[in-house]
Structure formats: C-alpha cells, structure tokens
C-alpha cells in the first residue's frame, strides 16, 4: 500500500476552482514520482484546504507539491479508513 500524507493549506479567498486546479497540478507534477492527489477538500468558512496525497515518501510528496505551486502549511503522514455501507470502518 502506498503511504498517505495529509497536506493542510491556509488560503484566504480560495475557490473550489482553485482546489480542483491544484489537485490536477499535483497529479501532473507527480507523474514520475508516483505522487497523486487522492482527494481534496475545501472548507471556505475556515479558509483552509486539505489534500490527501499518495506518495513514496514525505520528502517526495513535499517536492511534488512545491513544484505544483501549492503552498502547504502542514504535511504529515496519514492513514485512511473507509466507512462501510450502514456504518462502521473497514481497512
């Protein structure tokens, strides 16, 4: 399983269009580094965006995100659980 990382970006005035473009830019830059944006979430009320990223290492993900032009305030290793239909968590 490819390691996951959560990027947190404080971005006043960010729009959903920016979020989509940033996720695509990360995927594009990460092609050779096998880094991809799994999911992107914008919380407009808090001026914050989150990107769930797959990549080989924290350093590789940090480099790809930087090359994509996305300013990250925090990047940390993460885990993901998927909820089953009807509730509960599955790995």
Image (cartoon, rainbow, N blue to C red):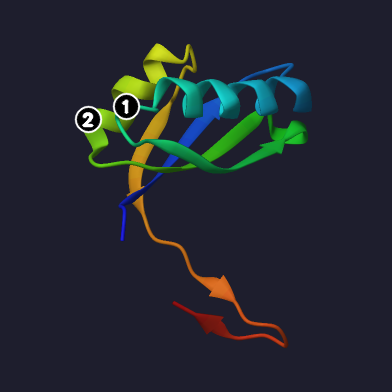
User: Is 82 displayed left or right of 12 in the figure?
Assistant: left
Whole-number angstrom distance, CA of label 2 to CA of label 1: 14 Å
Where residue 35 appears, as percent x and y from the top left, is: 37, 35
Residue 75, visible in the rendered structure: yes
Where residue 14 appears, as percent x and y from the top left, is: 71, 20
Where residue 45 appears, as percent x and y from the top left, is: 77, 34
Q: Quadrant of the C terminus?
A: bottom left
Q: How many residues crowd mark 2 within 10 Å: few (<14), some (14–19), many (20+)?
A: few
Q: Which mark is residue 8?
A: none
| Lower position in the chain sequence, tag 2 or tag 1 | 1
Badge 2 element: helix
Q: Is residue 44 above or below residue 65?
A: below
Towards the viewer: 44 or 33: 33
Q: Return the residue at label 1.
A: 32
Q: How many residues crowd mark 1 within 10 Å: few (<14), some (14–19), many (20+)?
A: few
| Residue drawn at 62 percent across, 31 percent down | 48
Q: Is residue 67 above or below residue 35?
A: above
Residue 47 in which image quadrant: top right
User: Is 91 displayed left or right of 76 in the figure?
Assistant: right
Residue 32 in which image quadrant: top left
Badge 1 element: loop
Where residue 12 appears, as percent x and y from the top left, is: 68, 18
Q: Return the residue at label 2.
A: 59
Q: Is residue 47 above or below residue 71?
A: below
Residue 15, visible in the rendered structure: no
């Amino acid at each position: 399983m490819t390691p996951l990382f959560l990027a947190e970006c404080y971005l006043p005035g960010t729009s959903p269009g920016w979020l989509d473009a940033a996720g695509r830019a990360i995927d594009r830059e990460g092609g050779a580094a096998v880094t991809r944006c799994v999911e992107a979430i914008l919380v407009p009320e808090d001026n914050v965006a989150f990107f769930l990223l797959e990549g080989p290492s924290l350093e590789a993900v940090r480099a790809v995100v930087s090359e994509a032009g996305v300013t990250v305030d925090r990047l940390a290793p993460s885990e993901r659980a998927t909820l089953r239909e009807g509730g509960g968590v599955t790995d």
